[in-house]
Amino acid sequence: MADVKPEKPEKPDEGKFQGELSKLQKEHEGLMKNLVGTPGARRLSWRSMQAIKREDGERMKGVRLQVGSSWGYAAARQREPADAPSSNAPLRDVYHNDVKAKLDLSKPASSSGPQTPAQQRQAALRKELSEIRATQSSKKSSKQNLFERQKALNDSITSKIAAQKLARAKVPYKSTDEIDDAIARLEAKVEAGNMKLVDERRTLESISQMKKQKKSFAAFDETEAAIAKDRASLADIRKQLDDPEAKALSDRFTEITKELDSIKAEQDGVFQNLNSLRDERTKWQKEQQDKFQEIKALKDAYYSQKAAHREYEQEAWKVRREKQRAEREAYEKKKKMDVANELLEQASFKAFTSEIHTCENLIAFLDPSSAVKKTDGPVSQFKASVGRTVTAEPKGMKVLKKDEEDYFIGGNSKKKGGKKGKAGSGEAASSAGPAKFSLSIGILEELAKVDVAPPSSQEDVPGVIEKLKGKLEHYKENQEKVTQENITKAKARIAELEKAGKLEDAMADLSVADQA
């Protein structure tokens, strides 16, 4: 029995779905605003609605992962983290926590019983507030010592820099290298012996003074190191004074104070209307839950229909792809078979067919009386043949070409004969001297194909004919052998190319070989 083709599911109307969903979500959001009464809770409700919209986007991804499965929210929930609020559970678990928190605020604190979340929050904030106060107090006392150290270091650095400048001003040199150069120059003048006694004494005194000044540079380096050390200490003190932790503690102190005041005010307001708050919660819970179930049913129906349509489209696409793959494989197989057959056909042609025909034609041209019978063989469009039909001519007569240059091989004459007088009889030619012998370009090319030197005179023709007959005999003897070798090589080449997946490239190789 033939398989019945399944009916194509109808694609859901996304515009209609979005319109109905938007309408229900607005109604649900209005119910949530009524359910959550305080301004802070309203903001939380709005953020929760945004979270649900993001979950809807994740649910769409779940459709792509689990096409065709009949599910509502379960598939999308698999993508959510474990600590995320469950969208399968009633939304009262998400939104009604605000109302529950208000009820908890109205409970009095108990020293023996468990504390409410609000009371636990108050205790934690108060503990943190006391810790911040203690930290700020200790930081304030420690900063006084830092200011005193900062002033002392500034004074020390200023005095050391002034003393350093004053000492360096007395020395006309900037480094020990300059002093060494000056001392070397003065000592060279003294050793030259060209100075007067008074000048030499003054020069020696200058050298002695320079050597003393050189020793003072070590003290300069020590002073510079001390200044650098003081500056590093000063930078560390400034970093401690500019500590961002103190500012962060101050900001946190302000935040905690505001939060404690907000909790206290909310506790006072909730305690005054506890009963009315409970009744209001029960009413809005029921209405909100009914509206939520409508939204859930609408989404389940839409996504189920969309998943079924997508699954059908994917199956149809798989069928088309499989059909295309089969057609492509059949085409590639046929193409490879055609290439292989072409290679075998080329290799099956008789070897040396072109050379045999060339030798037979040349023998018939040079010796028409030999009457060599042409070898029959398979005709191929790729065979090489003589470029033109050669007509036999009498022995001892040269070929005449109309309006073209004559090509001579051998002979004693250096000038080309005119058109008249070239057709003289054999007796006239023998009485005038050796007969002139020439061959056309086509004959020379055919001789070159079979690797036979052209005759230079009529006396060389018999030798050339014997060479051609030897070539012809060699070609005929090896024709079958070489043909079989070509077929074997072609089969090996086909197997090699098929294994490498490059069988199609063989046709390009054939075309290049034919052109060569």
Image (spheres, rainbow, N blue to C red):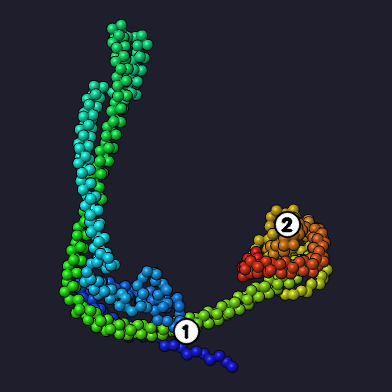
Residue at coordinates 81% horizontally, 61% vertically from top-left? Answer: 467
How many numbered marks are there?
A: 2
Quarter that holds the N terminus: bottom right
Q: Can residue 504 be seen in this view?
A: yes
Q: Which of 84 and 216 is in front in this view?
A: 84
Q: Which amino acid does label 2 sit on?
A: Ile
Residue 96 is marked as: none
Residue at coordinates 60% horizontally, 75% vertically from top-left? Answer: 332
Q: Are marks 2 and 1 in contact (CB under 8 Å)?
A: no
Residue at coordinates 25% horizontally, 57% vertically from top-left? Answer: 127
Picture quarter containing residue 263?
A: bottom left
Picture quarter containing residue 184?
A: top left
Q: In this view, does 340 lie to the left or right of 87?
A: right
Q: x, y percentage for residue 495?
A: 69, 68
Q: Which amino acid does label 1 sit on?
A: Tyr
Which residue is outermost to the bottom? 1
Q: Distance between the residues labelled 2 and 1?
A: 86 Å
Residue at coordinates 29% horizontally, 34% vertically from top-left? Answer: 229
Q: x, y percentage for residue 327?
A: 57, 80
Which residue is outermost to the front? 112
Within 10 angstroms of label 2, few (less than 14), some, or many (20 or more) residues?
some
Judging from the image, what secondary structure is the residue with disc 2 in? loop
Q: In this view, does 494 lie above or below 165?
A: below
Q: x, y percentage for residue 306?
A: 41, 83
Residue 312 is marked as: 1
Task: Name the residue beneath numbered marker 2.
Answer: 409
Q: Nearer the viewer, residue 201 or 268?
A: 268
